[in-house]
Image (cartoon, grey):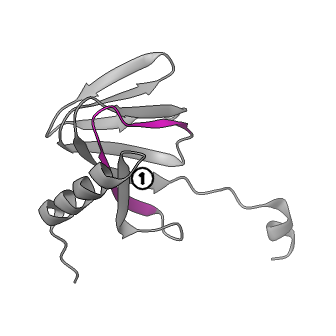
Amino acid sequence: MKKISLTALMRQQMDAALRNSSGRSADTVFGGHEQVMRQTMFALRAGATMSEHENPGEATLHVLQGRVTLTAGGHSWNGSPGDLLIVPQERHGLEAVEDSVVLLTVAKLQEPPRAEDQLSS
């Protein structure tokens, strides 16, 4: 078993975000591109954004510190510490209203088998 201190990681990521010219920092906490589930901690300096991007699967955003605004399809949702935002299955973006840290959990959608893969089995 591996134990991770989210509190310590929050401090590290916020320090990095405050130093980075982009105002952002991220670290994969669990999983990765080769796994179905991935958890990534993001820190964003106040005013920093993650521009609109596609949703690779089912996703939630747990606000750990600060305040953020999630936008998608002309709608917006505000999040504060302790809030869990369900990320819509469409292009979406995120803005930090104040220095913020969030934990993104994504369960990637499985791609259907390709026709050529089915023919070879």
Residue 15's place in the image compared with 59, above or below, is: below
Horizontal side of 53 relative to 62 (left or right) equals right
Using the image, determine if residue 82 lies above or below residue 111. Answer: above
Number of other residues with Cα within 10 Å of mark 1, as a class: few under 14, some 14 to 19, many 20 or more: many
Percent position (x, y) of residue 103?
28, 51
- Reading the image, the residue beneath label 1 is 106
Residue 44: in magenta span: yes
Q: Secondary structure at mark 1?
A: strand
Image coordinates of residue 48 in percent, x first then y, are 37, 36
Q: Does the stretch in magenta take in 43?
A: yes
In the picture, the quarter occupied by the N terminus is bottom left
Residue 15: quarter of image: bottom left
Q: Specify the principal SS of the magenta part.
A: strand
Residue 103 in sight in this render: no
Residue 75, image quadrant: top left
Residue reaching furthest to the bottom = 1
User: Hey, which quadrant is residue 83 in on the image?
Assistant: top left
Between 114 and 11, the residue placed more toward the observer is 11
Amino acid at circle 1: Val
Residue 24 lies, in percent from the top left, at 37, 48
* Residue 91 visible within the image: yes
Residues in magenta? 37-53
Q: Residue at x 34, y 36 (%)?
A: 86
